[in-house]
Image (cartoon, rainbow, N blue to C red):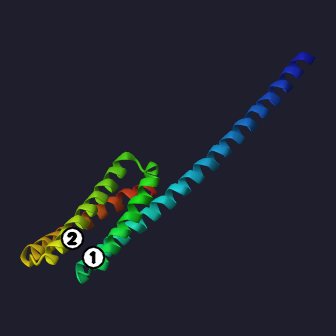
Amino acid sequence: MANDWFIAIASSVITLVIKSFLDDKNTRYKIAFEKLHTERALVIKETYKRLVSVGDDFELYGITRQPRDLQNSLETLRLFADYYNEHRIFFAETDAVSLDLLRDYCLKSYSQFRTSEVQEAQKDFASATDRYVKTLENFQKEFPTLRKKIEIEFRQMIGIE
């Protein structure tokens, strides 16, 4: 009978120790997960802010057509691309592909705008104007579409949709 009590008490103690150990591990994993989720949310937020700045700067150039505004667009795009490339690991591959597409699209638009400036400097005004207008129209159509797709993906990542 004494052995039965001893076994019952020992089993209870072992169960409590194991439960305590597992609870501690669970708490640590929850904290680590929450930290990672918080960091990921901050990366998404910063990436989105930089993405919006890229669009705003290109839109400003579309209005002013000033070379300094195009340079600002390139710098904003560079800052976005650098930040995104450093934090790409935080994005699922499908989301990363969307961001890659948008980045590459903006680089192509910059190149087209820059080519129109070169043509204008060479006094090829008709070609410069045509390229500028087509690039601006395309940017005003495509950028919001790409941005909207990324916004939906970001909302899903942070649990809004």
Q: Which quarter shows the N terminus?
A: top right
Q: Are marks 1 and 2 in contact (CB under 8 Å)?
A: no
Farthest front residue in view: 122
- Between 106 and 72, the one nearer to me in the picture: 72
Rendered position, 113 above or below 98: below
The Cα–Cα distance between marks 1 and 2, rounded to whole angstroms, is 12 Å
Q: Nearer the viewer, mark 1 or mark 2?
A: 2
Residue 28 percent location from the top left of the image:
67, 45
Whether 24 is drawn above or below 76: the answer is above
Q: Secondary structure at mark 1?
A: helix
Judged left or right of residue 124, residue 44 is right
Seen at 28% across and 55% down, the residue is: 101
Classify residue 139 as left or right of residue 124. right
Residue 12 horizontal side relative to residue 107, left or right: right
Kind of residue at disc 2: Phe
Specify whether residue 56 is in view.
no
Q: Position of residue 93 (x, y in %)?
A: 37, 46
Identify the residue at horizontal 36%, vertical 56% (top origin). 153
Taking the spot 34% from the left edge, 56% from the top edge, the residue there is 99
Residue located beneath label 1 in the image: 59
In the depicted view, which residue is nearer to us: 22 or 91? 91
Q: Is residue 101 above or below residue 24?
A: below
In which quadrant of the rendered view does residue 117 lie? bottom left
Of the pair 15 and 88, the residue shown nearer to us = 88
Q: Position of residue 134 (x, y in %)?
A: 13, 70
Q: Residue at x 50, y 55 (%)?
A: 40
In the picture, which quadrant includes the C terminus?
A: bottom left
> Would you name the residue on which mark 2 appears?
113
